[in-house]
Image (tube, rainbow, N blue to C red):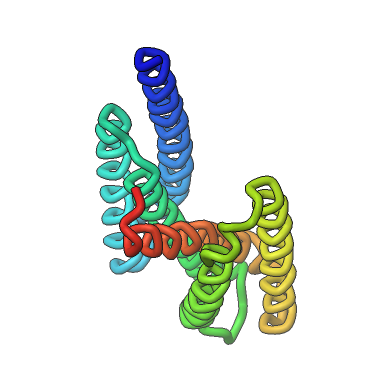
Amino acid sequence: MKSVKARSVHTTQEEMQKNFRFVIIAFFIISLFISVINIQSISTLPSWLKISSIILLICSIMLFVYGLTLSKKNLSWVNGGYHFFFFLLVISFQLLLTSTGMYTLGVREGQIIEEVNYSWLTLVVYFASAVIYVFLSLFISSPKLRRVNSYKAYVAGTIIAVVIIALIFITLNVIRYKIFTQPDTVKESYQFFIGAVLALFPATVLGISMIRVKTRGIE
């Protein structure tokens, strides 16, 4: 019986490590793709955008290398969750910077003519979204919800996530049409901003969940 139990634990840990590596590689590919977009226009970007893009790329590489190292060790839900949190946060920041960079480039080339301060607008909406996400995450990761039957909790969590993402997408597009005089001209750069806000949602949920789990001393 002992040998069977040990084998079962080993298989579970092996599957967890395999899935963890798959997600980390997927995150890194997404991060590299965003970085390539930034590099193509890096010579025309302001200095602060260039430096920020390079720093985030370095962070992404470090997280990828550390993630591969972590996947070879005794992986737990907590340290894996923290790693996903930081990687999603980096991707979200990259998308936010890409959005600002594309808007700046569009203004310089005369394709975008707006009086709105795009950087400040996106930052305000981004941080306002972060605050809302924190409150939503506190609800989603509440002990009462976790005590619900696992199948019901999974279904409820999936429905809540889909509804939230749909509402975010609709709200952000309403803002685009309300704020900008020519919303179609900013569509491309604004789509990256929407991606940044959407990526921030699972990052916030993970971050709050990890803090709660760590506080209760559960591994």
Residue at 40% x, 64% y: name it: 212
Question: Which residue is nearer to you in this view: 97 or 196?
Answer: 196
Residue with the most extreme bottom position: 115
Q: Position of residue 203 (x, y in %)?
A: 47, 58
Residue 182's place in the image compared with 156, above or below, is below
Nearest to the observer: residue 93 or residue 189? 93
Residue 2: name its quadrant.
top left
Q: Residue at x 53, y 76 (%)?
A: 135
Res. 94 image quadrant:
bottom left
Toward the viewer: 111 or 81? 81
The residue drawn where x is 34% and y is 68% is 46
Q: Is residue 145 left or right of residue 81?
A: right
Residue 98 visible somewhere in the drawing: no
- Image location of residue 137, percent across then percent down: 53, 67
**In this image, 206 relative to 116: left or right?**
left
From where the camera sits, is residue 202 visible?
yes
Q: Position of residue 53 (x, y in %)?
A: 34, 57
Q: How many marks?
A: 0
Residue 74: % across, % down: 28, 32
Residue 38, placed above or below residue 8: below
- Quadrant (top left, top right, bottom left, bottom right) of the N terminus: top left
Picture layout, residue 102 above or below residue 83: below
Q: Which residue sits furthest front?
A: 1
Q: Residue at x 45, y 41 (%)?
A: 27
Q: Which image quadrant for residue 160? A: bottom right
